[in-house]
């Protein structure tokens, strides 16, 4: 797997962008859920935080596939990352007395995330140089979400505790900005038939 990432510059950029972006997502979720719990004391609102994390992506995903097939995937990933960066900074408008912006901006981030996974999955075959690279890349990219769920949530909890929840929201914005930069480094077309 590591040989593939060393050899194929475009797949490396795509993979690192995905890892960084997922890490930021889980940083945010841990901080957001903790802030809602501490601010409101409501287990129901904490469960709504999870709904804001997952439902918008579910609702937007039927449209995401056709958009990913119609438009340039690399440009789409760059645009989505830029919008997610802005939305992540919007999380900073949430306070202990006003938690509704957390739900709104997390919902926007989640809805935009529904375009990322299909764009990456559809783009990987265009970036792999042969069938062996494609098999390895599919295994590597397929395992990323689960690994980042465990690692990102754990690191996000420690990070939020050490630096505060607003710092976790900033870290999420930075992760999207880094992903944007990495997507911009990809040179091979991701839209070939």
Image: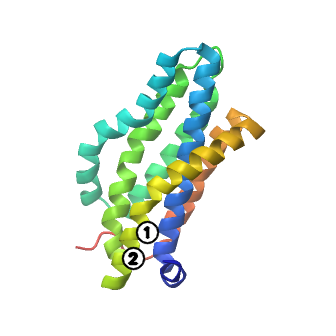
Residue 2 located left or right of residue 143 = right
Residue 122 located left or right of residue 142 = left
Q: Quadrant of residue 161?
A: top right
Residue 78 in sight here: no
- Residue at x 54%, y 49% (from the top left corner): 150
Q: Is residue 112 above or below residue 78?
A: above
Q: Is residue 46 above or below residue 167?
A: above
- Residue at x 36%, y 70% (from the top left corner): 138
Residue 135 located left or right of residue 164 = left
Which residue corresponds to mark 1?
Answer: 140
**Residue 117 position within the rendered picture, expressed as x and y whole percent measured from the top left:** 37, 55
Q: Is residue 95 above or below residue 129?
A: above
Residue 19 located left or right of residue 58 = right
Helix, strand or loop status at disc 1: helix
**Residue 83 position within the rendered picture, expressed as x and y whole percent measured from the top left:** 49, 44
- Residue at x 41%, y 46% (from the top left corner): 113
Which residue corresponds to mark 2?
Answer: 136
Callout 1 environment at 10 Å: few (<14), some (14 to 19), or many (20+)? some
Tell me, yes or no, whether the two marked residues, 1 and 2, touch with CB atoms within 8 Å. Answer: yes
């Amino acid at each position: 797997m590591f040989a593939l990432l060393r050899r194929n510059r475009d797949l490396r950029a795509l993979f690192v962008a995905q890892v960084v972006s997922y890490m930021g997502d889980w940083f945010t979720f841990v901080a957001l859920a903790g802030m809602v719990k501490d601010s409101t004391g409501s287990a129901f609102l904490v469960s709504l935080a999870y709904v804001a994390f997952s439902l918008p992506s579910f609702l937007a995903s039927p449209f995401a596939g056709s958009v990913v097939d119609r438009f340039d995937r690399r440009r789409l990933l760059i645009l989505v990352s830029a919008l997610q960066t802005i939305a992540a900074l919007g999380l900073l408008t949430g306070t202990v007395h006003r938690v509704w912006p957390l739900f709104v901006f997390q919902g926007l981030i989640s809805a935009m995330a529904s375009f990322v996974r299909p764009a990456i999955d559809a783009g990987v075959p265009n970036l792999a140089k042969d069938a062996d690279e494609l098999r390895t890349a599919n295994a590597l990219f397929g395992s990323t979400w689960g690994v980042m769920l465990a690692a990102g949530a754990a690191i996000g909890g420690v990070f939020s505790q050490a630096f505060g929840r607003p710092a976790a929201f900033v870290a999420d914005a930075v992760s999207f900005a880094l992903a944007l930069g990495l997507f911009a480094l990809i040179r091979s077309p991701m839209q070939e038939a």
